[in-house]
Amino acid sequence: MSRERTKAAAFPVDRNDVDLMRAAHPPHWMNPTPDGRYNLVVIGAGPAGLTAARDAASLGAKVALVERGLIGGACVNVGGVPSKSIIRTARLYADMRDAENFGGDVPERLHADFERAMMRMRQIRQRLSRADSAVAIASEGIDLYFGEARFGGADTVEVAGRTLHFRKALVATGAHPSAPAIPGLAEAGYLDNESMFDLTQCPERLLVIGGGPLGCETAQAFCLLGAKVILAQNEPMFLPGEERDAAQILSDALAREGVEVRLNTEVVAVRREGGKKLADLTREGDTTTISVDEIITGVGRSPNVGGLGLEEAGVAYDADGIKVDDHLRTTNTHIYAAGDVCLEYKFTHTAEATARIVVRNALFRGHERLSELVVPWCTYTDPEIAHVGLYPIEARRDGIPVKTYTVLMHDVARAVMDGEEEGFVKIHVREGSDRILGATVVASHAGEMINAVTLAIRSGMGLHALADVIHPFPTQAQGIKMAGDAYRRTRLTSLRRRLAARWLAWSRR
Ligand SMILES: Cc1cc2nc3c(=O)[nH]c(=O)nc-3n(C[C@H](O)[C@H](O)[C@H](O)COP(=O)(O)OP(=O)(O)OC[C@H]3O[C@@H](n4cnc5c(N)ncnc54)[C@H](O)[C@@H]3O)c2cc1C
């Protein structure tokens, strides 16, 4: 059973959280009084809703933005911002433990200070929320309403006793953590992304359920911050969508760092005994019971579609979210959707990109298409795993012949100097051409490196052209150029080689 929260996480109260709430949901906010029809009513002030409201208002549209919880949505409050902030501290401790490999000494009595790591996270979250404060949004000419929004009909939204009339509306209500259907789990209690950032003490023994991006990032970070982590995944590999060798590198890295990796393992029951939580894990018919202090689930996200009055508005949806066409229009042609509530790929950058499409299509009769977006993504483990475009398996399924150019990070000078040699750059092209189909990068900074390939695909540049891009030496992104060089070497046919040799021999005379 999944659930939807009506508010973002109830944060523990420290100064940073109080300031964050003041910015993101001021306690004494006075909702405006609607005055005439809006060009655009936006439901949800996460990355999608904020982007759409701001872009539309900056172009002169009359815009209403409705938020029931905290401005910033999952990203700032309970998603990418807090998770990447604690990952940074986790990496610091990983580096300190690895000091000898860098010619240093491991500090004596090295002990991860979880409490301070979480405090730093709260400071960062508060700081980043300032740019999107209620006051800042209102000052941009947007009518900001706090409250639970619900369609009253095909062209109205109800919020906090007010009726907002619209020409166009955008549903950008995001998603919430799916709860795994494990007997006893709800009764025993568990954390998900809406509650785990409230922790102030590191659990001694922690079970993380789910080996997707969220589960892997969480397991690694908590392990490096001092927890004894067991990561259970009910499939043979972590990150099931990614290339197998990428997932294998991650699996090895997690195990090396001390995460107890349990693949092909199902958590079948949970119960509470004393102060502990006991979890039954089965693998190939064998059941073992582990005792942990806390359980975190990271098994996926379900769209926020409940209570919105979508039926009254004529907007079709199912368990995967709101149904949209390639222009992001719902079954009510005046209502659009963007972000996690309608997308398969649930990322901040896709939420923002789809919101931009909606503004152009809804307000300016544009014809921009979701299918034309080139969307990269990254799992922020160490090493990071980033991808863009097609996987070879997808290309072959579509009958496209694939040739892959691979550079191992241990051949990239900067990666060797940094002691970050694990991973690879793989660029897949259509065989017989340099047209880039996709790429996977596994490296410490894969999320930065993938951008060059995304730009190339977006602008129609081939792998040949990537070999011409000059990178400052030494950078890990040189791995991308090296893949281009590898392609270029294959173009040196024996005829060209003979002609070049003949020319050089002649020019020596
Ligand atoms: C732990 C974690 C880590 C993540 N890390 C990354 C990352 O590193 N990179 C990345 O790209 N993505 C990451 N994501 C995903 C990213 O956070 C989401 O894809 C993004 O926030 C989606 O934006 P959105 O605007 O569609 O929805 P949301 O951010 O969910 O915002 C939706 C908003 O709508 C509001 N709302 C819902 N219903 C109503 C209603 N009826 N009335 C009024 N308001 C309503 C909600 O309160 C919420 O504020 C992460 C997610 C999680 C959980």
Image: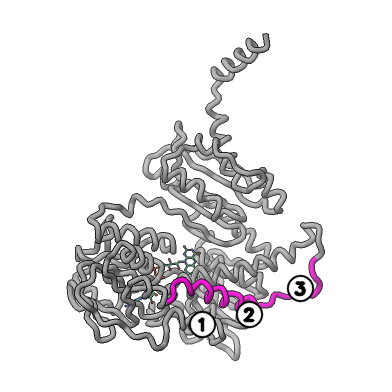
The reply to whether dot 3 and dot 1 touch (C-beta < 8 Å) is: no
Instruction: Give the mark nearest the N terminus, 2 or 1.
Output: 1
- Indicate the amino acid at tag 2: Cys
Q: Quadrant of residue 114?
A: bottom right
The reply to whether dot 2 and dot 1 touch (C-beta < 8 Å) is: no
Q: Residue at x 49, y 58 (%)?
A: 240
Please tell me whether mark 2 sits on a helix, a strand or a loop: loop
Up the image or down, 302 lies above or below 253; here it is below
Inspect the magenta stretch and tell me whether residue 92 lies in it. no
Residues rendered magenta in the picture: 106-133
Please tell me whether mark 1 sits on a helix, a strand or a loop: helix
Residue 495's disc number: none
Q: Quadrant of residue 29?
A: bottom left
In front: label 3 or label 1: 1
Mark 2 Cα-neighbour bin, 10 Å: few <14, some 14–19, many ≥20: many
Please tell me whether mark 3 sits on a helix, a strand or a loop: loop
Q: Residue at x 54, y 86 (%)?
A: 12
**Which residue is at the front of the view, 317 or 501?**
501
- Find disc 2 in the rendering and name its residue: 202
Instruction: Give the mark nearest the N terminus, 2 or 3.
Output: 3
Where residue 60 appears, as percent x and y from the top left, is 29, 64
Q: Residue at x 59, y 39 (%)?
A: 482
In front: label 2 or label 1: 1
Residue 19's disc number: 1
